Structures are given as structure tokens and as C-alpha cells.
Amino acid sequence: MMFSKSKCRLCGDEVRFVLKHLKDKHGIYDKIRQMRMEHIIKKYFEE
């Protein structure tokens, strides 16, 4: 999962680096930095 592309639920983009995408495109890094990676992917990305 980490090295394949995931579809963002917020904008529909196919992304490989989920944290970079959330920080650069959506500006929500401060909100998610305390979350575990598995929770971030379940909440913001489709598998």
C-alpha cells in the first residue's frame, strides 16, 4: 500500500506520497501529524 498509488478522497488525485500530498495540496498537515499512518490512509485515501 505504501509504495502504490492511492486515490485521495478529498480531490480524487492519484498520489504516491500521501503526507506530502495532504500537506502541499490540502494544507492539513498540522491536523494529521498526531495520527497514525493507517488511520490517515483509511480516512483520506481509498485503497
Image (cartoon, rainbow, N blue to C red):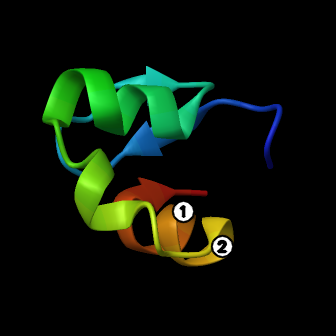
Quarter-of-image position of residue 3: top right
15, 33: nearer the viewer? 33
From this view, report whether residue 40 is shown above or below residue 24: below
Residue picked out by circle 1: 41
From this view, report whether residue 22 is shown above or below residue 39: above
Q: Residue at x 44, y 61 (%)?
A: 33
Q: Is residue 39 left or right of residue 44?
A: right
Quick one: label 2, few (<14), some, or many (20+) residues within 10 Å?
A: few
- Counting from the top left corner in percent of width and height, residue 10 is at 18, 47
Q: Which mark is residue 25?
A: none
Quick one: label 1, few (<14), some, or many (20+) residues within 10 Å?
A: some
Task: Identify which amino acid the numbered label 2 is placed on.
Answer: Glu
Q: Residue at x 77, y 32 (%)?
A: 4
Q: Residue at x 33, y 38 (%)?
A: 22
- Counting from the top left corner in percent of width and height, residue 45 is at 45, 55
Q: Is residue 13 left or right of residue 18?
A: left
Task: Identify which amino acid the numbered label 1 is placed on.
Answer: Ile
- Quarter of the image with the C terminus is bottom right
Quarter-of-image position of residue 21: top left
- State yes or no: discs 2 and 1 in contact (Cβ < 8 Å): yes
- Counting from the top left corner in percent of width and height, residue 30 is at 27, 55
Residue picked out by circle 2: 38
10, 38: nearer the viewer? 38
